[in-house]
Amino acid sequence: MKGIYDKLEQKLRDHALLKKEITNRKLELEFAKVADGNTTAVQTSNGNSDPVGRLVEKWEMDGDLITMKRRYATIDKFMKEIDESHRNIIKMRYMSREVVSWATIANRVGYSEGTCRRIRKESLDKLANCLAWES
């Protein structure tokens, strides 16, 4: 079970970077070269040879991009749906620039360290259910 929590914690830490990764993946697809070195020039499935249409279709068909966007949206929705005090604990622990100790988090939210850890576990369990589609 610890391995699952480690993966979920990492996804929370990576959440802020995920938006940048999505942008980078879109750029990779936009400037992708085919094997012969030419830029990709494929007609869209509806017969459209519009470059913007081709690019959007690439984005819509790329599995990596789809997964990143879905994970970002799932975590974003999860964070909006959980209780504000729980959200603050998760943000301080996983989404801040520095690692915040449990003692500091407990002091800031007015709970005991044990309560903060319990909230963390409950929140990670909820997040695991939200991200079950990834496994």
Image (cartoon, rainbow, N blue to C red):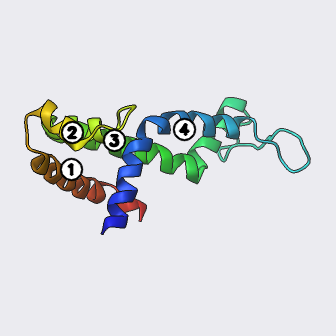
- Give the percent coordinates (x, y) of residue 92: 27, 35
Q: Of the residues under marks 2 and 1, which one precedes in the sequence?
A: 2
The residue that mark 2 highlights is: 89
44 sits to left or right of 10: right
Q: Is residue 50 above or below residue 6?
A: above
Residue bearing mark 1: 120
Name the residue rendered at 55%, 46% in the picture: 65
Q: Residues within 10 Å of mark 4 (few under 14, many from 20)?
A: some
Tell me which label, 2 or 3, sits earlier in the chain. 2
Percent coordinates x, y for residue 76 in the rendering: 33, 39
Disc 4 secondary structure class: helix
- For disc 4, the marked residue is 22
> Which residue lies at the image location 29% right of the left edge and 37% below the top edge?
100
Viewer-proximal residue among 113 and 41? 113
- Residue sticking out furthest to the right: 36
Q: Secondary structure beneath disc 3?
A: helix
- Report which residue position mark 3 lands on: 94
Q: Can you tell which of label 1 and label 4 is closer to the viewer?
A: 1
Q: CA distance from mark 2 to mark 1?
A: 7 Å
